[in-house]
Structures are given as structure tokens and as C-alpha cells.
Amino acid sequence: MSLTVCPDYLFSGVVFQGILPFAAIAGFFGLTCPVLLFGLGSPHLPAGLSTVMAAAELPAGLLIAMIVLGEPLGIAEWLGVVVILAGVCLAQVPGFLARHREEV
């Protein structure tokens, strides 16, 4: 989309002079590192815990956006996070109860 608005963006030198270092850092810590570490760690965890950890990425991302970027977050965003986390946790309750009954 940015190339349609400003086609000279790539060839003007702006990318390599100012944006590239920040984009590389943000890309590594925002996209590459979490996916890589989650992919390496999830085979060693139960499926339910992996699901909860994947859902916990959303509030972590919102907190970072609020703290680092100063993004204003409203009640709708936080309510969405609560609904998603509650849904994931509720989906894990039957398995938890079954394991608890087996132990008793």
C-alpha cells in the first residue's frame, strides 16, 4: 500500500538511512523471536498450556504498545482481551476437572 501512495519510498534512501535499523529490531523482537521461541517450547508443554500461552500473547502485545509506543487503549480493547482469555480458560476446565478426578 505504501508503494502505491509513495512509489519512490524504496529507492529514495529513506529505508536504509533511517527506518531499517528500527524495522529490523522491531521485526526480530515482534515477529521472529516470539514465534521461534513458542515453536521451540510448545512441543515440551501440554496442549492446554500451549493454548493459554498463545492467548496470553495478546495482552502482552497490548501492554507493550501502551508502554513503549504510548498507544491509547480503551475499555473495548481490554474487554476483548478478557473475553478471549476467559474463553481459552473455560475451554481448559473439562480437562482440568478430569485430571483432578483421576488424582482423587
Image (cartoon, grey):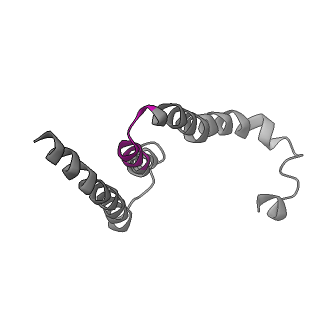
In the image, is 58 to the left or to the right of 95? right
Q: Quadrant of the N terminus?
A: bottom right
- Which of the 4 quarters of the picture holds residue 91? bottom left
Image x and y of residue 100, in percent: 16, 45
User: What residue range appears in magenta?
Assistant: 44-54
- Which of the 4 quarters of the picture holds residue 31? top right
Q: Residue furthest bottom?
A: 76
Q: Quadrant of the C terminus?
A: top left
Q: Residue furthest left?
A: 104
Residue at 46 percent of width and 42 percent of height:
68
Residue at 27 percent of width and 59 percent of height:
90
Circle count: 0
- Residue closer to the observer: 4 or 44: 44
Image x and y of residue 49, in percent: 36, 43
In the image, is 89 to the left or to the right of 6? left
- Residue closer to the observer: 52 or 60: 52
Q: Is 93 drawn above or below residue 13 in the view shown?
A: below
In the image, is 7 to the left or to the right of 92? right
- Residue closer to the observer: 72 or 63: 63
Image x and y of residue 39, in percent: 54, 36
- Which of the 4 quarters of the picture holds residue 36? top right
Image x and y of residue 46, in percent: 38, 39
The answer to whether residue 45 is magenta is: yes
Residue at 61 percent of width and 37 percent of height:
32
